[in-house]
Image: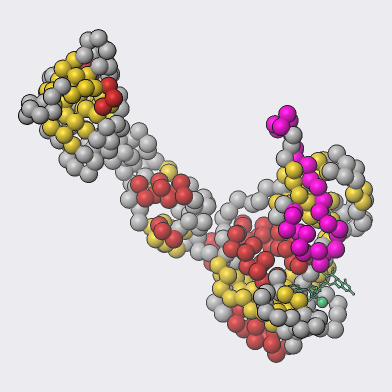
Amino acid sequence: MLQRAAQSTRLPLVACADSVLARDLLASADLPLFVNSQMDGYAVRSSDVAGAGPDSPVRLRVVGSTHAGHGPGPEIDDDEACKVMTGAPLPDGADCVVPVEDTTVEDTTVEDTSVLVHAPRVAGEFVRRPGDDVRAGDLVIPAGTRLEARHLAAAASLGESGLDVRPRPRVGVVATGSELVAPGRPLEPGQIWESNSLTLGAALRACGCEVTATVISSDERDDFTAALDIATGDADLVVTVGAVSMGDAEVVRQVLADREGARFAPVAMQPGGPQGLSSWRDTPVVCLPGNPVSALVSFVVLLRPVILEAVGRVPVQTGRALLSRDVSSPAGKTQYLRAALVPGSAGAMSGPPTAEPVSGPGSHLVASMARADVLIEIPADVTSLAAGDEVVVVPL
Ligand SMILES: Nc1nc2c(c(=O)[nH]1)N[C@H]1C(S)=C(S)[C@@H](COP(=O)(O)OP(=O)(O)OC[C@H]3O[C@@H](n4cnc5c(N)ncnc54)[C@H](O)[C@@H]3O)O[C@H]1N2
Ligand code: MOO
Ligand SMILES: [Mg+2]
């Protein structure tokens, strides 16, 4: 259904956040790139300062200085030091750095400045060497990684200006309902503010999809087919929401259920029973139920896992929680109860959190769904659970 997501495309690094890496990124060079100072201080020979201490400072002649972005400064010999700033290439002849805090400068006015070193250093101290971080050829980011700030830091440090990532699936969304009005617009009697396209748009983006079109259609056939044409565009997938049940105005079902390969059938889950799968202009169309809770639950339970797999992301892990109160559950359908998660008590660091069901089971109870973090999954054959029972929870 989302084959394009298995291919790869090159994006500039600045646009890669949240994309999935298509190919392993191997280090093109050692990091750090060159030997450089870890501190602001003096590059010296460890053999010169081995005996240095608070009461036995060692005097070294300062032969020059260097900064980050400059050359390594003058080569040093025995009893010499070169002033270095953090990130500056280490001068030849030096094998360690004495931080400026462990030194005093006797006289900065004369040309032949000397520095007193008050602490011993061993070879390599406060020196950053190629390969300390990664070696050329090392695996830095494996294919399939969802790129975050830390991955971009690694790629940029290796000089990569772009990365091969999986293309984002392009998804068009059509919300149906003659009663729907964009939030913020005035309502006529019987109208409501539209929410499903926003919910699904956000949920799709959170899974790595690009939402290419969002169309609100009335329950009129012509309006809906025009909306489908727009949403299909160059999308890989269209998601419709609403008008799939058993009423007189089920325009989605009317237009899409008879198409070749279409399948409209109730799924044994609650909320989210009525579902459909069809196509329009060779683009797959997934049809979710219109009740706002059902729409999101259907997405989370049925569509999100498919999308995450297609884009190469790890699936959302289910968790375990203790039920806060007794619940009863109708038999025959897997039930998904909206619930708020309360972390386990401080004493029980690894103890499971508590899941507190929010609101009733009605799939129109959309505002109270905002309080839910998870869905409690109750198997079809379980009809009652008691407070304290362990349950499976699906993050929303
Ligand atoms: N006789 C039966 N009636 C219903 C059944 C059934 O099995 N037999 N199933 C119920 C269930 S369960 C669900 S879920 C809904 C699904 O209906 P539709 O997919 O046809 O959805 P609509 O009728 O278009 O809308 C349902 C409800 O949700 C509101 N809605 C729809 N879209 C939006 C939106 N974008 N934003 C906000 N609210 C929306 C709509 O106004 C309705 O109130 O069918 C039951 N009926
Ligand atoms: O199953 Mo409907 O999807 O609950 O309200
Ligand atoms: Mg309906």
Above-or-below relation of 231 to 135 = below
Residue in the foreground of this view, choosing between 381 and 355: 355
Q: Is residue 186 visible?
A: yes
Q: Main secondary structure of the magenta part?
A: loop
Which residue is most to the bottom?
222
Query: Is residue 187 in the magenta section?
Result: no
Quadrant of the rendered structure where residue 169 is? bottom right
* Colour logic: secondary structure
How many numbered marks have been drawn onto this rendered protein structure?
0
Q: Residue at x 65, y 86 (%)?
A: 226
Residue in the foreground of this view, choosing between 30 and 18: 18
Above-or-below relation of 388 to 276 = above
Give the quarter of the figure containing the N terminus: bottom right
Measured as percent of width and height from the top left, residue 175 is found at 70, 76
Residue in the foreground of this view, choosing between 344 and 317: 344
Q: Is residue 88 left or right of residue 264?
A: left
Which residue is most to the left?
111
Measured as percent of width and height from the top left, residue 360 is found at 86, 58
Quadrant of the rendered structure where residue 219 is? bottom right
Measured as percent of width and height from the top left, residue 26 is found at 39, 46
Q: Residue at x 78, y 42 (%)?
A: 354
Ligand 3 lies in which image quarter?
A: bottom right
Residue range corresponding to the magenta coloring: 346-372
Q: Residue at x 27, y 12 (%)?
A: 54
Q: Residue at x 45, y 58 (%)?
A: 16
Give the quarter of the figure containing the C terminus: bottom right
Q: Is residue 129 left or right of residue 199?
A: left
Measured as percent of width and height from the top left, residue 279 is found at 67, 77
Q: Is residue 278 visible?
A: no
